[in-house]
Image (cartoon, rainbow, N blue to C red):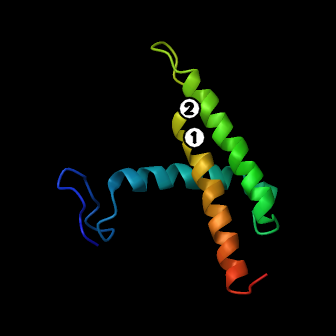
Amino acid sequence: MKNISTHTPVCPDCEGVRISLLKFVKIQEIILRKNDYKGGWKYMSLKQLRQRLKQEVNELSKAIDKITKHTAPDIESECADVANFAMMISDNFNDLHRGIE
């Protein structure tokens, strides 16, 4: 994997994956594990997941609007929610595309 920028820190033991991406993925995993009791996303249709993605984007937008110099909502968590639903759509689409149900 080629390093895009010499100023972007990468993990030497992770095939050059950016450190900021690794930190973000850890947040995503924490959120996914916290919601494991819900049964996962394999049972959800792409349309259902798209609707949840839209809801999460709206939550992120509202959190960004609430940022002031005195308060900072959990933007990282909201971003991870958005990314998780995008990942779920990709995962389920890949299963459908391969004929796996």
In the rendered view, tell whether residue 97 sits above or below residue 34: below
Query: Is 1 on the left-hand or right-hand side of 28?
Result: left
Residue closest to the eye, 26 or 81: 81
Mark 1: which secondary structure? helix
**To which quarter of the image does residue 46 belong?**
bottom right
Residue 77: which numbered mark, if any? 1
In the rendered view, tell whether residue 88 sits above or below residue 7: below
Query: Is 12 on the left-hand or right-hand side of 62?
Result: left
Residue closest to the eye, 60 or 37: 60
Mark 2 → mark 1, Cα distance in angstroms: 5 Å
Q: What is the x, y in percent for residue 2?
A: 25, 70
Amino acid, disc 1:
Ser
Residue 74: which numbered mark, if any? 2
**Quadrant (top left, top right, bottom left, bottom right) of the N terminus:** bottom left
Amino acid, disc 2:
Asp
Quick one: which residue is furthest to the top in this view? 70
Q: What is the x, y in percent for residue 84?
A: 61, 55
Q: Residue at x 33, y 57 (%)?
A: 18
Query: Is 28 on the left-hand or right-hand side of 10?
Result: right
Report crowding for label 2: few under 14, some 14 to 19, many 20 or more residues within 10 A (C-alpha): few
Quick one: which residue is furthest to the left in this view? 6
Query: Is 101 on the left-hand or right-hand side of 59?
Result: right
Q: What is the x, y in percent for residue 61?
A: 60, 32
